[in-house]
Amino acid sequence: MLAGSTLARPSLPGLEVAANNLVVPLCAGALAWRARATLWEVLARHRLLLAATLALYLWVWISALLGEAPSLSMRLSAKYGAYAFVFVCLLLALHRPPRARRALRAVHAALVVLAMLAVLEVFAPRPFEQVRGPLLVPTRVASLLVWPNQLGVLSAVALALGAAAWRARWLAPWWFATSLPILLAASALSGSRNGWFVLGAALVLLVWMRVLRPLQSAAIGVLFLLALVTFPISTAQLGLRDVRYLPLSRAIAAPPALDGTTTPVETMIPRLALWKAAVREIRQHPLSGIGLEVFANSRGPAITGQHWINTHNLALNVAVELGLVGLALCAAWLVALYRSGDPSDATTALPLLALGLGQLFDCFIYDYTFMTCAALFAACYASRLGAAD
């Protein structure tokens, strides 16, 4: 299912949707069918969460009808409505803790494989461009994902998941130790400052939840900082391109041309403009919003000049597209999810926290791989792994 979620480029014949729009729901449906014996148990246990999911999805359709571009928003409501279907299927398929534990191991392994491919992309970018298409910033890497920022955030999520699973003793120590430098290298090479922020926050949360000792977390942080000042792309993204002796890799080879990189200040200017425009739209359309992707297709490009760009903040994006009613329904869904699981279980709570932190300065709700991972983590959280142990 995760492999199918990366099929963003091949389109289905005669349809305006990518292959992943069909592959992921089919895989989730097959998993749910195998676990159909637990259907009534799941309905009884998660009736509040399922009701919140249904209410939110219905409001997406209502908002689309009331929005500025009903035909566009309704088509996207049908297309991305698969998220709700996938989540409900996974809630059924992963209801038993042993299944959820196996799923988390598989997700961690898949994210490590994506990170390994990202490292290989540095040396052989052409095959990746043929699979997913070229990047706007060719000096960064994205593995099989459509954009480097998703890779950076998911690498940080995988690190947090791996550490928590290792501490819970259902992930082999050698696998966690092997995956750690791979994930750190992929995060650095992605050039995603958002991903670096999530990784730093995850290291703090790992200490706070007593998964890692402070010295262990600090050692990983130092190793990551070393990676950031070693690779040319991460050094440029930090705004240290003109600092003498950096990147450290210049001792081995001259740094390549880094077209398209920006400093932290340069990237915050358009973000602030997008946030201001989002607040203005919310004031003008407070209840039902302007509809799915209307901002990304019209307001965002007018500000940045890019073809498609959203608000770069999940809460603002929801409020712009679905209005304050939609934002309230999202909050209700989050409360229902929180109550369905065990927030003290780091193996399921930490990945969700890391995903949420990654949406403070970006918004990946239209990325199928990211949302598939989010649905998996949410379903595993609801399975109450910690209570089972």
Image (cartoon, rainbow, N blue to C red):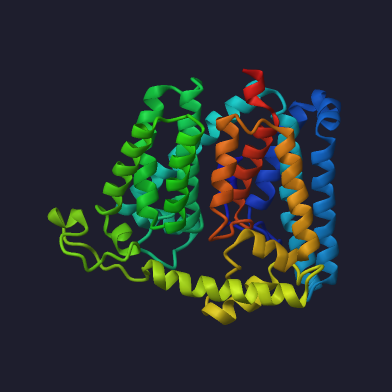
Residue that extends furthest to the left in the rendered view of this protein: 251
Q: Quadrant of the N terminus?
A: top right
Q: Name the residue rendered at 65%, 72% in the picture.
A: 278
Q: Name the residue rendered at 59%, 45% in the picture.
A: 4
Total numbered circles: 0
The answer to whether any part of residue 130 appears in the image is: yes
Residue 9 position, x and y percent, is: 56, 58
- Classify residue 115 by image quadrant: top left
Q: Is residue 51 left or right of residue 238?
A: right
Between 44 and 73, the one lying in front of the other is: 44
The answer to whether any part of residue 144 appears in the image is: no
Residue 381 position, x and y percent, is: 65, 33
Between 113 and 174, the one lying in front of the other is: 174
Q: Is residue 280 left or right of residue 267?
A: right
Q: Is residue 346 left or right of residue 283?
A: left
Above-or-below relation of 82 to 389: below
Q: Is residue 219 left or right of residue 101?
A: left
Residue 307 position, x and y percent, is: 56, 75
Q: Quadrant of the C terminus?
A: top right
Residue 127 position, x and y percent, is: 40, 54
Residue that extends furthest to the top in the rendered view of this protein: 389
- Classify residue 28 by image quadrant: top right
Above-or-below relation of 304 to 311: below
Q: Name the residue rendered at 20%, 59% in the picture.
A: 246
Above-or-below relation of 72 to 210: below
Q: Name the residue rendered at 29%, 42% in the picture.
A: 223
